Each structure stands twice: as structure tokens, then as C-alpha cells.
């Protein structure tokens, strides 16, 4: 009986020692916190395969059209074929279409309007791990971590939200710590930060 009491006492003492260490391990991160502001005012949307674009040729409605960028990154429209489009912003693509149409139309004026899409892979926000709905999202100017979390439905019950990180491809794969649990579960808006084109959000599973 005495030995049993001693064993139980030892286990309780061990638990008291381990518990704080576990909390420290969970709360610490080897990565710096993500900067609160990261967006750029001069951001331009980059077209990617699957994007739908409206090509409007002023005073020439018969050759205006809506086309989808093919998997190879090219488009075909009235009076032109296999024109590279992926990786360009809409204004650049419009100027290139004008150059092609100038062979058939005098001083063509072209406007390219993005009708739908999520841009090239290099610009997408990708969420992996313990998100409710892991997926790739189109980046939008001044998009924040909260916007991303709403789009993916938050985090799962198994997520270690405050150990989540952003892998920032635009900064040479630099990694930052983010506090998703504080943001999503506790409503701490100080944990909200900007995201950038190409960011990858990694949400690990909790060990406890």
C-alpha cells in the first residue's frame, strides 16, 4: 500500500514538471512573427491558366470576345491564335493584342477585363494542413489572414493554430509564425496580418 502511494505521488510530481514544459514547447516558435503589413500598393493581377478574360475591341464588337486561358497559358480569339497570356497583367495583354490586331485594323484600342479565375500558381494563396477546407485561393489586394481563414472555414479541432506558419515564396521561402488560434478561436484581431501573393499557410496538428 505504501509503495502504491509513493508511485502515485511520484507520478503527480512528474506531471507537474512536464505540464509547464509542454506549454512552453507549444507556445514557442523558431520563426519570427509575420509582419502586420505586407501588401504593396503597386500590385497588378497576373493572369494564369483557367482565367476567363473579356477582350473588348473599341468600335469593333464583332471581334470582341470572352476567352479562357488554356492550360498551356495561351489564348485564341478573333483574328489571332495561340497568343501567350499567362504571366501577364491585363494591361500588358491588351497592348499585345493591339499589336496583333494592327495588322487588320487601323489603330485598334483593346481593353482586357478579368471575368474570373485565381491567377497562376505562383500568385495563389495555398492553405495546407489542419484547415477545415484546405485549398488554393486567388490573391486580392490587401488580403489578410482573417480573409483567408473565412474562405477555408477556419481550423480543425486538431490544429495547433498558434504554431502555424506562413511560407513566403516572394521573400525566398522565408517562414513566419502566425497565431491562428488566437485569431480564429479567441477573436484576437492583433493576430491578423497581411498575406502576400504566393504565400503558403501551413497549419500543423496539435500533439495534445
Image: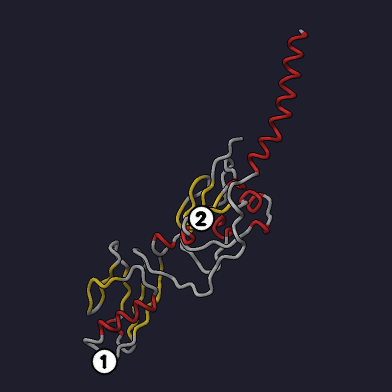
Residue under the image location 41 percent in, 68 percent down: 116
The residue lying toward the viewer, choosing from 21 and 115, is 21
Residue under the image location 76 percent in, 14 percent down: 6
The residue lying toward the viewer, choosing from 164 and 143, is 164
Q: Which residue is mark 2?
A: 174
Quadrant in the rendering for residue 79: bottom left
Q: Does 181 appear above or below 72?
A: above
Toward the bottom, the furthest residue is 106
Q: Give the image location of residue 137, x and y in percent.
A: 46, 59
Residue under the image location 59 percent in, 43 percent down: 160
State which mark lies toward you, 2 or 1: 2
Label 1: which secondary element: loop
Q: Give the image location of residue 133, x and y in percent.
A: 50, 49
Give the label on residue 106, or none. Answer: 1
The residue lying toward the viewer, choosing from 19 and 67, is 19
Give the label on residue 136, or none. Answer: none
Quadrant in the rendering for residue 69: bottom left
Q: CA distance from mark 2 to mark 1?
A: 49 Å
Quadrant in the rendering for residue 119: bottom left
Q: Give the image location of residue 100, x and y in percent.
A: 25, 81
Q: Is residue 86 left or right of residue 29?
A: left
Q: Give the image location of residue 191, x and y in percent.
A: 65, 56
Amino acid at each position: 500500500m505504501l509503495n502504491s502511494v509513493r508511485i502515485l505521488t511520484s507520478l503527480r510530481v512528474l506531471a507537474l514538471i512536464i505540464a509547464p514544459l509542454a506549454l512552453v514547447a507549444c507556445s514557442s516558435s523558431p520563426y519570427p512573427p509575420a509582419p502586420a503589413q505586407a501588401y504593396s500598393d503597386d500590385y497588378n493581377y497576373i493572369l494564369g491558366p483557367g482565367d476567363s478574360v473579356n477582350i473588348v475591341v473599341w468600335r469593333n464588337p464583332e471581334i470582341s470576345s470572352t476567352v479562357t486561358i488554356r492550360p498551356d497559358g495561351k489564348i485564341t480569339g478573333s483574328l489571332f491564335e495561340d497568343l501567350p497570356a499567362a504571366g501577364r497583367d491585363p494591361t500588358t495583354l491588351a497592348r499585345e493584342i493591339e499589336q496583333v490586331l494592327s495588322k487588320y485594323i487601323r489603330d485598334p484600342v483593346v481593353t482586357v477585363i478579368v471575368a474570373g479565375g485565381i491567377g497562376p500558381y505562383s500568385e495563389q494563396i495555398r492553405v495546407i494542413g489542419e484547415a477545415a477546407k484546405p485549398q488554393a485561393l486567388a490573391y486580392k489586394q490587401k488580403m489578410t489572414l482573417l480573409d483567408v481563414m473565412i474562405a477555408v472555414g477556419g481550423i480543425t479541432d486538431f490544429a495547433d493554430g498558434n504554431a502555424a506558419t506562413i511560407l513566403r515564396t516572394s521573400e525566398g521561402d522565408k517562414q513566419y509564425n502566425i497565431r491562428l488560434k488566437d485569431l480564429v478561436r479567441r477573436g484576437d484581431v492583433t493576430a491578423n496580418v497581411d498575406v502576400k501573393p504566393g504565400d503558403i499557410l501551413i497549419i500543423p496538428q496539435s500533439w495534445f
